[in-house]
Amino acid sequence: MEALDALLNRVSVPRLTDPAPNDAQREALFQAALRAPDHGQLRPWRFLTIEGPARERLGELFASAVQKRGDASEAALSKARAMPLRAPLLIVVIARLHKQHPKVPVLEQQLAAGCAAHGILIAAHAQGVGAVWRTGDLAFDAHVHAGLGLADNEELLGFLYVGTPLTEPRTAPVLATADFVSAWGD
């Protein structure tokens, strides 16, 4: 797939099934992530992969976080447990921040990690692999962060759900660039 085609036609694919990307596809996903803009070459990101039985353990971690918040209803706990089972592979996107860097502010580092995640999504699309970026309350939960082993200088930016599309991905909408671009000074 041509690069411009991948950029112009990538869409989120939320309905995923087995198989997960193979080793060669995964390598391409992560190599694409490592090409993200990176002022100072800090590489302010890292990724966790979660698959197989680890998805069920993540579901238990999610349920535990929901319970700690005071919502112990069976429906809420079941929903939390099922979340990681929506795809055969989850990639946790983590910003690894150099908080006192003299030239690269934290926001720029967070954006770089976000660009790395976007690189994964584009590379997935280019290979015919389905992917969707999800966050939600649990992505920002301290109990979840601790359970995933995040350090004090790290932030969870989201979960990339990755797998084989259950249906043909939708067509990307064509948006008018004039709605988002203007010349300054006119």
Image (spheres, grey):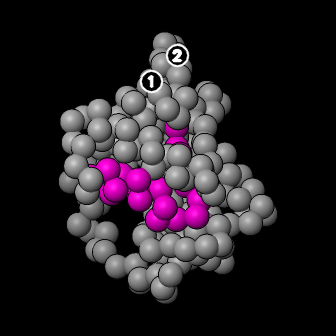
Mark 2–mark 1 contact, CB under 8 Å? yes
Judged from the image, the secondary structure of the residue bearing numbered disc 2 is: loop
The residue where tag 1 is placed is 105
Left or right: 165, with 81 as reference point: right
Tell me if residue 115 can be seen: no
- Category of crowding for the residue at label 2, using alpha-carbon neighbours closer than 10 angstroms: few (below 14), some (14–19), many (at least 20): few
Q: Is residue 109 above or below residue 52?
A: above
Q: Observer-nearest residue: 152 or 89?
A: 89
Q: Position of residue 47 (x, y in %)?
A: 60, 42
Residue drawn at x 45%, y 49% as measured from the top left = 59
Residue drawn at x 21%, y 36% as measured from the top left = 70
Query: Which amino acid type is marked by label 1?
Result: Pro
Q: Is residue 105 above or below residue 64?
A: above
In the image, which residues are magenta?
Answer: 76-96
The residue where tag 2 is placed is 101
Q: Position of residue 20 (x, y in %)?
A: 65, 67
Q: Is residue 29 above or below residue 42?
A: below
Q: How many marks?
A: 2
